[in-house]
Amino acid sequence: MKITVKNLSRFKGLTPEMFPHLLELAEEKDWFRYFLFVSTPFRFDMLRAVQENLNDIEFWGSFREIWMHAENLWEDWENIEKLLELNRPQRESIMDAKERAALKKLPTSIQIFRGGLTENLDGYSWTLSKEKAEWFAKCRQQQDNAFSFEGECQKDDVLALFLERDEDEILIAPKKVKLLKQIQVKVNGIHAAHIHTKKYALDSLQMSAMQPKNMGKSVSPPDYKFVYEKVRQDVF
């Protein structure tokens, strides 16, 4: 897609005020800032539309940045699949030197894990860490459909290994994963996955202890203080 005002106007999450900035950034080939202008849920859609304007290094660099900041990758399943099916050269540039070296050291057959709901099992994001998969399963828990999935894949089928977020993340097409087993995961009480950061959790709960109200309903201060202590001592 040629990047013009007319073409940009069809994208969700963009306003006319943004068009001059996007045109300027595209002209400068400043793709990092270009995609920052696009709302997170629509970045893969934008990359898919404008990818012909990027060289291979720019494409894979942009793919990585969008991936790292995406909130619900499973919702972008179609765009991710279509982008990866382009099979653009220099895909190894999606990883840094440390990640490429770590991937090279992995065995031919790799045990991988994924945590989530049964309906989004077919995702591109897996991990080498069983504990991390269970963490994500608890984070996504809704009723009784949260699971930790264990699978097996071949190293040659791995598209990338990401270490940036300490998740030992494996990027791989779902059809290349052999599912071995799934274990239902339950959360008892509060789980850290439901809170963005430790500091945010502690500050928020401490404030709740001082101002004991929850959705307009009065709650006794000891209940909140108990929650605060539990998060501080047990979760973190």
Image: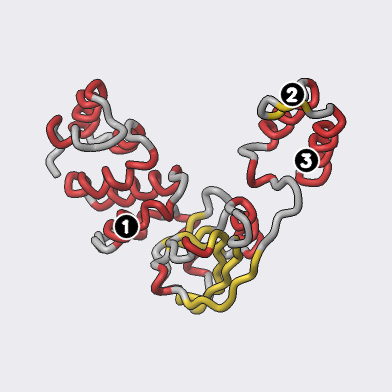
| Sequence-first tag of 1 and 2 | 1
Q: Residue 146's image quarter?
A: bottom right
Circle 2: element type? helix
Q: Residue 27 in the image: x percent, y percent? A: 18, 32
Instruction: Name which residue type carries label 2.
Output: Met
Residue that mark 1 sits on: 78
Q: Any mark on residue 207, and which?
A: 2
| 60 lies above or below 232 | below
Q: Residues within 10 Å of mark 2 (few under 14, many from 20)?
A: some
Instruction: Count residues near mark 1 (Cα–Cα under 10 Å), then give few for <14, some for 14-19, many for 20+.
Output: few
**Among numbered discs 3 and 1, the one appearing first in the sequence:** 1
Is residue 198 rendered to the left or right of residue 81?
right
Residue type of the residue flagged with mark 1: Glu
Residue 166 appears at what percent x and percent y? 58, 51
In this rendering, position of residue 227 left or right of residue 112: right
Indicate the secondary structure of the residue bearing disc 1: helix
Q: Secondary structure at mark 3?
A: helix
Q: Are marks 3 and 2 in contact (CB under 8 Å)?
A: no
N-term-proximal mark, 3 vs 2: 2
Residue 185 place in picture, x, y as percent: 66, 62
Residue for point 51% across, 58% down: 169
Q: Which mark is residue 231?
A: 3
Question: Marks 1/2: CA distance?
Answer: 42 Å
Residue 196 placement: quadrant = top right
Amino acid type, callout 3: Val
Asked whether the beta carbons under mark 3 and mark 1 sit within 8 Å of each other, the answer is no
